[in-house]
Amino acid sequence: MNLHFTRGLIPSLKLFFLSALLNLALPSERSFSNEVLASAEIRISKRCVPGEVKQFKSKHRSFRTGYYPHDSEMEGGFVDRRGQQLRTLQDYLDGEAEYVSVAMDHLDLRFPYGTRLRIPEIESEFNRCIEFRVVDTGGRFKGKGTQKIDICNRTLEDTLEPYSNGWTTIFALD
């Protein structure tokens, strides 16, 4: 079975059962409501169309690469720049994280800690709206501004996937 199909199927089934339980209408094929279960609270974000961003504060062209939580000098450990656990793209897709951690130049004042981003190329790959947050940095980002972004992935193998690498458009929502 195709890995992308299974990763899309499991969250869709979760949404179906959650919707049935809460007696909510299911989203259309073109829109998707991201669900996040956080302790006893259920938070469902606004509906959006994967890959389409209509409201944003700023738009930038950037080169994306992947990294993963690992205790090495290159990867930088398991926590972000404020000591919070890193959240991977795969955890988000599995419904286990409320956002995806990304690393950028922390000296660029346009992207303070926690800035919410959308990346249409990755959303289109998974046919889901995905919330990314600028929460991490590293020496490779100093002075790069918006030219470089690192997407947090679960494993080294995930960092090598095409969705983690290449030129991209990033939309800052905050």
Image: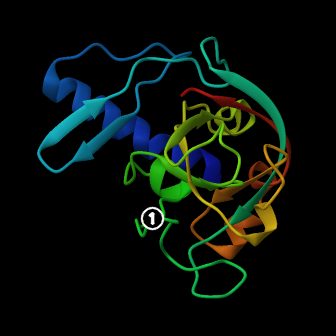
* Picture layout, residue 87 above or below residue 119: below
| Picture colour scheme | rainbow
- Quarter of the image holding residue 52? top right
Q: Residue at x 84, y 53 (%)?
A: 144
Identify the residue position indicated by label 1 in the image.
Answer: 82
Q: Nearer the viewer, residue 6 or 48?
A: 48
Q: Nearer the viewer, residue 129 or 10?
A: 129
Spot occupied by residue 64 in the image (x, y as percentages of width and height): 79, 51
Left or right: where 23 falls relative to 127: left
Identified by mark 1, the residue type is: Arg
Label 1 element class:
loop
Neighbourhood count class around disc 1 (C-alpha, 10 Å): few under 14, some 14–19, many 20 upward: few
Spot occupied by residue 69 in the image (x, y as percentages of width and height): 56, 74
Quadrant in which the N terminus is drawn: bottom right
Left or right: where 140 falls relative to 158: right
Tell me if I can see residue 60 in this picture: yes
